[in-house]
Amino acid sequence: MSNNFPEFDPQRKQLSRVTALALLLMAALYWYGTYPDMGAALVFAIPPLLMSILVWIRRPTANLLAGVLALLWFAHSVMTAYVSPQHRVWSLAVAALCVIVIWSVSWVGLKVRRAKRRL
């Protein structure tokens, strides 16, 4: 029986580590940035933390879900940076981490798509 998923090559393993690390940093920034409000801290810090664990243990749908959630977090952080100047640095740091997550989960698919075009 053939496996539809390609073997987990070293580049994908390294990109998964980058994704997990960026998600952990994002969780830490959300926890630090919303600390006085524990409800917001839990809502914004727990999902990146759980996603980093799922990416680290290589769940098949974790990269897709991390990318989709990173798009939402990116939009939220850009809106926060625009609305409240006192949180601008924190929000732009989260936006940069979101871009890293989106890039790292999309890289393998973009590479395969580019290889198919060359054929």
Image (cartoon, grey):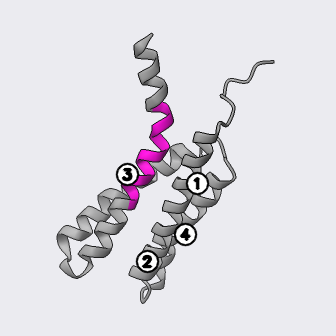
Residue nearer the viewer, 25 or 46: 25
Residue 20, position in %: x, y?
A: 56, 58
Amino acid tagged 3:
Leu
The structure residue drawn at horizontal position 47% and vertical position 80%, both measured from the top left corner, is 39
Residue nearer the viewer, 11 or 101: 11
SS category of the residue bearing label 4: helix
SS category of the residue bearing label 3: helix
Amino acid tagged 2:
Ala
The alpha-carbon separation of the residues under discs 1 and 3 comes to 19 Å
SS category of the residue bearing label 1: helix
**Badge 2: how crowded within 10 Å, few (<14), some, or many (20+)?**
some
The structure residue drawn at horizontal position 33% and vertical position 61%, both measured from the top left corner, is 95
Res 34 quadrant in image:
bottom left
Amino acid tagged 1:
Arg
Labelled disc at residue 71: 3
Labelled disc at residue 17: 1
The structure residue drawn at horizontal position 18% and vertical position 68%, both measured from the top left corner, is 82
The alpha-carbon separation of the residues under discs 2 and 4 comes to 10 Å
**Badge 1: how crowded within 10 Å, few (<14), some, or many (20+)?**
some
Amino acid tagged 4:
Ile
SS category of the residue bearing label 2: helix
Foreground mark, 2 or 4, reads 4
| Proximity of marks 2 and 4: CB atoms separated by less than 8 Å | no
User: Which of the two labelled residues, at mark 4 and mark 1, occupies the earlier sequence position?
Assistant: 1
**Badge 4: how crowded within 10 Å, few (<14), some, or many (20+)?**
some
| Proximity of marks 4 and 3: CB atoms separated by less than 8 Å | no
Res 63 quadrant in image:
top right
The structure residue drawn at horizontal position 30% and vertical position 70%, both measured from the top left corner, is 91
Labelled disc at residue 40: 2
Looking at the picture, does residue 29 appear above or below residue 47?
Answer: below
